[in-house]
Image (cartoon, rainbow, N blue to C red):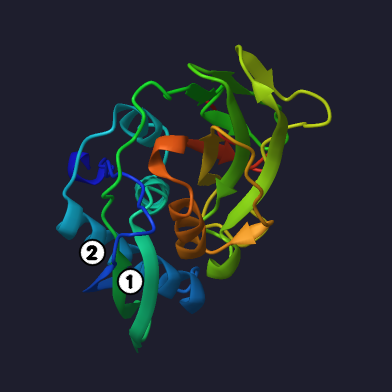
Amino acid sequence: MEKQILSLLFSLITSSSQPEWHRGEAIESFGPDVSERAACMAAENKAIFSVVRQVAGEAVSTSQYQLCNEASEEVCQMLISSTSYTEGMVTGMRKLSTEVSGSSIRSCKVAVEVALTKDSGKSDIGFDPEIRVSKTQLREGELFKVIVNPTQPMFLNLFYFSPYLERHEQVQFLYQFEEVITSKVELPDLPLVLWATFPKTKVNGNIAGEVMIAVATKRPISFRKTFSLAEFNQRIQEIPKSERRVVRMPYLVWAKDKSHKLQ
């Protein structure tokens, strides 16, 4: 299990970087209680994760280790993969093949090519805001906050990444803080209200793992409402690295209509 409690620490990419394409594949076994579509999506996620891990290496994340102690192995792997994908290196994906085989216990094998881009820019080490969620374990419908403590004047956009959505809309715009932030604030602040929502798509179990993404910039930046992850990372590339900080905050949501005790 410890080998699975891994996250990748990557820099975001700049527009001058050129992507490199790498091949990966993975297999997901599934029974009658899991749909073929869900199994093949899980295999695709594993294939992408295997490419990123092979190319960029691995590092242990304490926050993810703690979250994984509270979740099933499946949710843990999904959460780790989700956080890894949002690190900015994945800027393209091509599905090469999908093969489904078996009868009672079936398997889906997916082969992909993934475009990875390495950062060549320099960040401003003085532009390093503290941004965190007030809770990383939430019940569906529970209110929570995003706490922001800037080191320099900054503007803020919030998104969340859900691996349970269709790939073209997995990154969802949440809120733009239009006023410059110069001191510590706690969101929500009118008109923003943040509450935990459980994915509407079928989730295997009563726990879902998602990632809140905060994009801090030195000047106001506008974004559209939905992105694929590759599109989102490409959009981030357009902002000079010295003018941005991106903070990723994984969290768990328990469905309210199923019993589970939080520790």
What label does residue 110 carry, if any?
Answer: none
Q: Earlier in the sequence, mark 1 or mark 2?
A: 1
Compared across the picture, whether 158 is left or right of 56 comes to right
Describe the element under mark 2 as helix, strand or loop: helix
Looking at the image, is mark 1 or mark 2 nearer the viewer? 2
Q: Foreground residue, 62 or 141?
A: 62
| Residue for point 31% across, 69% down | 115
Q: Amino acid at mark 1?
A: Ser
Describe the element under mark 1 as helix, strand or loop: strand
- Tell me the residue that label 2 is attached to: 51
Give the percent coordinates (x, y) of residue 194.
71, 32
Q: Could you tell me which quadrant the N terminus lies in?
A: top left
Give the percent coordinates (x, y) of residue 157.
62, 39
| Residue for point 63% across, 42% down | 255
* Crowd band around label 1 with a 10 angstrom C-alpha radius: few (<14), some (14–19), many (20+): some
Compared across the picture, whether 219 is left or right of 70 comes to right
| Residue for point 61% across, 31% down | 155
Q: What's the distance in space between the residues labelled 1 and 2, CA to CA?
A: 20 Å
Q: Dots 1 and 2: beta carbons under 8 Å? A: no
Q: Amino acid at mark 2?
A: Val
- Tell me the residue that label 1 is attached to: 29
Q: Foreground residue, 81 or 146?
A: 146
Give the percent coordinates (x, y) of residue 85.
38, 54
